[in-house]
Image (tube, helix red, strand yellow):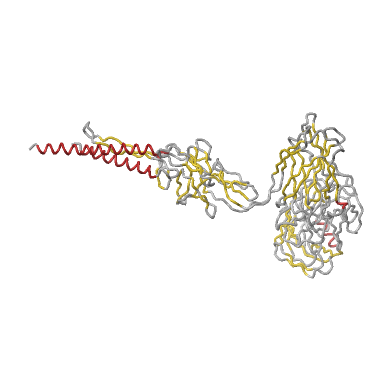
């Protein structure tokens, strides 16, 4: 009889209706994939067959339509692949990209599964290729970045005539006395570029470049650079390719408090050092080596309480010790610098009235190993009864060669050397010491700002036949614990030397950018130890300008694309890569899956990259509910990569993938299934009637 066949047909139709009903129910579920029931016939020992059964339910992983939502954290996949999530310590896969960010920066879906991807290194570069991890977006503020590159494209009117139709501007050349007419200069120009750059503390600085047609050549222009709020600024296109100009600039600030801050030779980066203060100072151990400070040594100085022992280059232990044992003072020309890590807390510094110099020497009762280097130092302290110095515990370290432990203790010495500044062009130090002073104030800044620095004792050009050691340069006046270095450059006057020549060829295209000129008598004038104010003209440009600086600023001006045509002078493009600090304001996600942190300074940085996975047989994935699947042996091993690579699709931010259920087809299939159910019911009814007829034969 056909009852079993009809019943199997009813069961199959019911299962098919279940699948179709589930499809219709999830027609609005984001990322849902429709299913279809597959059936197989059943045979035993008869060719007639025993009916049907549902063999499997297949999922259709075809793409759904992308629907725009405008919400940044709604993600849709255009193409193949799945998002990779971590849920309850298990990796699951989904096409639903409706995300939200938790308070601790994780991106997760409504079920709490966290999306996975690739992290970034210290430079903000995505590190792909490794095993994906849960992405966490930090909310820390972005530090300021100094401008290092400025690109400007402009046209200079070739019809301009040298010396005619000039505009005028007045610029301050000495920010320490901007109201002094002598500290101002009038500029004549035909055209100017104005733009904003940023130093390493995020301070905006207005830059103006003034272009004046030169009478010396038809296609030649003189360009002068001016910056607000800055002391010396050097335009230096030497060694640059055509179209690039390097402009190192230093902002004025309180200078360091050395007895002699020294003028530096253009060489490696140089840092600022301070002499130690006068008075009773707790003994500090120093391991010194035969070579003195090396290039890798680090010197740290606290402005109001330095623990840096300084001398110039050239002496050995025996020379210093002999002078000490014989009662002689050791000048700054004897010995080497001992670089130090400053690490002490609340060292008490006693002051005895007026500012006096103090000498620190080696206790003669302690034997010293030959080859060790000992240094004495001058010290300054403004007149106060007691100074409490906050610093970190002093532990003076050198390079471990034939080192000996040396205990440095303080002792009183001669008169202090008050430093004064005069506004002139050079200095002449004769006989007192082989160093040059810099713009100074005696302990005028009482802050916790810390300098760090690395340098050899290099040698600059001789001044009056005396070699000067390269050592101190700049100090901080801004943020606490912010390290500042002075980049060696060329010493120019504050203005009048910040210029360069721009030349064009006969076709109006940029041909070269000329090097700047060293002003006659350029330099800075200082008062020496005996209050003399002689002058000296530096014959070499191998000098570094000295000025206290909250932040050094060096950037290249790229003039590539500049032209000289017979049209109005105008700027057509201007870009620079510096920015101020910024607060975290949110994230955005790009098409390649890069998660971008956005900041209030209109800058952005990568926080990671969402990973995607594909499978050789996605139909073998096992549904886990909540729009998620897990891998099985039937699906094969996952193939992980970045969106848009290989066979993986791209990510559409602000959009979701709708269900791929075809509602019209499902309704038609439902009607067909209903008819099949009715037909199977009719089979049972017919079989019943046949059976009833057989019974009635009696």
List x then y, in percent, for residue 280.
78, 67
Q: Is residue 307 above or below residue 455?
A: below
User: In the orientation shown, which residue stands out farthest toward the top?
Assistant: 506
- Give the number of callouts: 0
- Asked if residue 572 can be seen in this view, the reply is yes
List x then y, in percent, for residue 139.
59, 53
Q: Quadrant of the N terminus?
A: top left
Residue drawn at the location 84% of the way across and 61% of the way down: 324
Say whether residue 551 is left or right of residue 592.
Answer: right
Q: Nearer the viewer, residue 152 or 422?
A: 152
- Tell me where residue 58 sits by quadrant: top left
User: In the orientation shown, which residue stands out farthest toward the bottom?
Assistant: 385
Say whether residue 622 is left or right of residue 216.
Answer: left
User: In the orientation shown, which residue stands out farthest toward the left?
Assistant: 698
Q: Nearer the viewer, residue 411 or 71?
A: 71
List x then y, in percent, for residue 401.
72, 53
Say whether residue 611 is left or right of residue 365.
Answer: left
- Tell me where residue 637 sits by quadrant: top left
Say whether residue 246 is left or right of residue 164.
Answer: left
List x then y, in percent, for residue 688.
17, 39
Q: Nearer the viewer, residue 178 or 570?
A: 570
Q: Quadrant of the C terminus?
A: top left
- Tell me where residue 273 sits by quadrant: bottom right
Q: Is residue 178 above or below residue 241?
A: below
- Asked if residue 290 can be seen in this view, the reply is no
């Amino acid at each position: 009889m056909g009852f079993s066949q009809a019943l199997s047909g009813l069961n199959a139709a019911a299962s098919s209706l279940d699948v179709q009903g589930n499809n219709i129910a999830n027609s609005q579920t984001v990322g849902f994939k429709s299913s279809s029931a597959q059936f197989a016939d059943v045979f035993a020992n008869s060719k007639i067959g025993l009916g049907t059964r549902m063999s499997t339910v297949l999922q259709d992983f075809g793409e759904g339509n992308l629907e725009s939502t405008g919400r940044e954290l709604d993600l849709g996949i255009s193409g193949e692949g799945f998002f990779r999530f971590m849920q309850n310590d298990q990796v699951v896969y989904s096409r639903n990209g409706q995300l939200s960010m938790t308070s601790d920066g994780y991106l997760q879906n409504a079920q709490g599964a966290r999306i996975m991807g690739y992290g970034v290194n210290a430079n903000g570069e995505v590190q792909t290729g490794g095993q994906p991890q849960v992405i966490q977006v930090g909310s820390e503020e972005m530090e300021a970045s100094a401008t290092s590159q400025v690109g400007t494209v402009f046209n200079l009117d070739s019809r301009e005539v040298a010396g005619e139709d000039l505009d005028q501007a007045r610029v301050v050349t000495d920010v320490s006395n901007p109201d002094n007419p002598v500290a101002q200069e009038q500029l004549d120009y035909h055209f100017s570029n104005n733009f904003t750059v940023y130093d390493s503390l995020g301070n905006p600085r207005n830059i103006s470049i003034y272009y004046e047609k030169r009478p010396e050549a038809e296609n030649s222009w003189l360009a002068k650079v001016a910056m607000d709020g800055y002391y010396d600024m050097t335009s230096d296109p030497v060694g640059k390719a055509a179209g690039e100009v390097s402009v190192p600039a230093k902002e004025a600030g309180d200078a360091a408090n050395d007895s002699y801050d020294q003028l530096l030779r253009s060489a490696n980066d140089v840092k600022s050092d301070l002499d130690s203060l006068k008075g009773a100072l707790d003994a500090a151990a120093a391991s010194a080596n035969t070579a003195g400070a090396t290039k890798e040594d680090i010197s740290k100085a606290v402005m109001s309480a330095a623990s840096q022992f300084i001398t110039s280059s050239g002496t050995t232990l025996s020379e210093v010790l002999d002078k000490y044992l014989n009662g002689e003072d050791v000048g700054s020309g004897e010995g080497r610098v001992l670089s130090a890590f400053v690490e002490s807390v609340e060292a008490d510094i006693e002051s005895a009235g007026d500012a006096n110099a103090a000498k620190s020497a080696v206790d003669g009762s302690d034997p010293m190993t030959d080859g060790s280097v000992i240094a004495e130092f001058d010290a300054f302290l403004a007149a106060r009864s007691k100074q409490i110095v906050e610093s970190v515990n002093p532990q003076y370290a050198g390079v471990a060669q034939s080192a000996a432990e040396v205990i440095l203790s303080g002792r009183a010495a001669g008169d202090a050397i008050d430093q004064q500044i005069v506004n002139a062009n050079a200095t002449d130090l004769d006989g007192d010491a082989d160093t040059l002073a810099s713009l100074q104030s005696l302990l005028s800044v009482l802050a916790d700002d810390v300098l760090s620095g690395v340098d050899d004792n290099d040698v600059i050009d001789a001044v009056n036949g005396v070699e000067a050691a390269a050592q101190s340069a700049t100090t901080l006046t801004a943020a606490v614990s912010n390290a500042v270095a002075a980049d060696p450059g060329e010493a120019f006057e504050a203005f009048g030397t910040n210029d360069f020549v721009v030349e064009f060829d006969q076709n109006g295209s940029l041909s070269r950018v000329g090097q700047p000129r060293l002003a006659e008598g350029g330099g800075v004038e200082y008062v020496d130890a005996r209050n003399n104010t002689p002058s000296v003209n530096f014959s070499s440009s191998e000098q570094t300008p000295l000025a206290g600086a909250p932040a050094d600023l060096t950037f290249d001006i790229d003039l590539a694309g500049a032209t000289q045509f017979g049209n109005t002078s105008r700027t057509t493009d201007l870009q620079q890569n510096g920015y101020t600090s910024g607060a975290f304001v949110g994230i955005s996600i790009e098409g390649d899956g890069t998660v971008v942190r956005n900041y209030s300074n209109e800058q952005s940085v990568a926080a990671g990259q969402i990973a995607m996975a594909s499978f050789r047989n996605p139909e073998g994935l096992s549904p886990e509910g909540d729009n998620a699947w897990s891998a099985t042996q039937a699906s094969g091993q996952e193939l992980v990569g970045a969106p848009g690579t290989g066979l993986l699709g791209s990510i559409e931010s602000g959009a979701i993938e709708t269900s791929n259920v075809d509602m019209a087809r499902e309704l038609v299939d439902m009607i067909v299934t209903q008819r099949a159910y009715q037909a199977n019911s009719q089979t049972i009814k017919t079989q019943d009637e046949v059976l009833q007829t057989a019974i009635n034969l009696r």
